[in-house]
Amino acid sequence: MSRLRRTPRQSRQPRRRSYDQYCASARALDIVGDRWTLLIVRELLAGPRRYTDLHADLPGVSTDMLAGRLKDMEGTELVTRRRLPPPVSAYVYELTPRGRELLPVLRALAEWGAPVLDEPRPTDAVRAHWFAIPLLRALEGVVTGVMQVTLDEGVFHVRVGGDGAVSYADGPAEAPDAHLRTDTATCRALSSGELTLAEAVAAGRAWLDETVRTG
């Protein structure tokens, strides 16, 4: 009986799935169409994050899935990984300029999805900074500068430049130009266009202080 000679087992990288269509939309989906990819972008648009922080703010993703997606995103040059200087000595992931260009995509998705964002389901996780992107719609043309937003679920801040540039980050701002306190239901109404910021303040559903600053 002849013996088959066994060759050393080599690890093979799975081929990324492709639509194999010569179409810009299809090519884009080849890169960002996988489950969790755009939600990872949503988190990293708020600034560099450690792996553990990403995992904490992406409820439902497995550690293997998150690690795989981040590796894919590094390969497509959406994300970079760098080490923070001592004494922190931890690695963080952050978006490349190419990755940050996805903000308008996420804004369009949030605007499209806002009308179907009803009351939270019992199984829904909620994070305050998830409201930052849809809230930008209500703030543009109304606010210029840094606004700190406080919800029952937490605090985030958004920056609206005079040139139309926008960004956001989790947590309080160092020196906000304004403070806004409201609730998730009002945030949802502002995001969908049901309410303007002025209407929310007049109705007592939002409280705006443009004089308080924190050091």
Image (cartoon, rainbow, N blue to C red):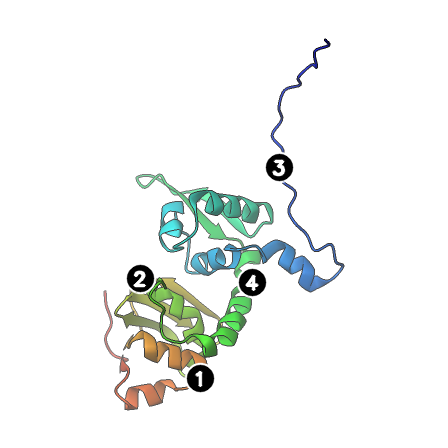
Amino acid marked by disc 4: Glu
Q: Residue at x 28, y 71 (%)?
A: 151
- Residue 28, by quadrant, is bottom right
Q: Which circle, 2 or 1, is nearer the viewer?
A: 1
Q: Which circle, 1 or 3, is nearer the viewer?
A: 3
5 over 209 or under it: above or below: above
- Residue 99, by quadrant, is bottom right
Front residue of 9 and 163 = 9
Locate residue 159, reporting x and y percent: 40, 70
Amino acid marked by disc 1: Gly
Residue denoted by label 4: 101
Give whichever of discs 2 and 1 has the lower sequence position: 2
Say which quadrant the C terminus sits in.
bottom left
Helix, strand or loop under label 1: loop
Q: Is residue 37 left or right of residue 203?
A: right
Residue denoted by label 3: 13
Give whichever of discs 1 and 3 has the lower sequence position: 3
Say which quadrant the N terminus sits in.
top right
Q: Residue at x 39, y 50 (%)?
A: 55
Q: Which circle, 1 or 4, is nearer the viewer?
A: 1
Q: Residue at x 40, y 76 (%)?
A: 118
Helix, strand or loop under label 3: loop
- Residue count near mark 2 (Cα–Cα under 10 Å), binned few <14, some 14–19, many ≥20: some
Residue denoted by label 1: 193
* Distance of label 1 from label 4 (alpha carbons): 24 Å
Residue denoted by label 2: 171
Front residue of 117 and 97 = 117
Locate residue 170, reporting x and y percent: 35, 61
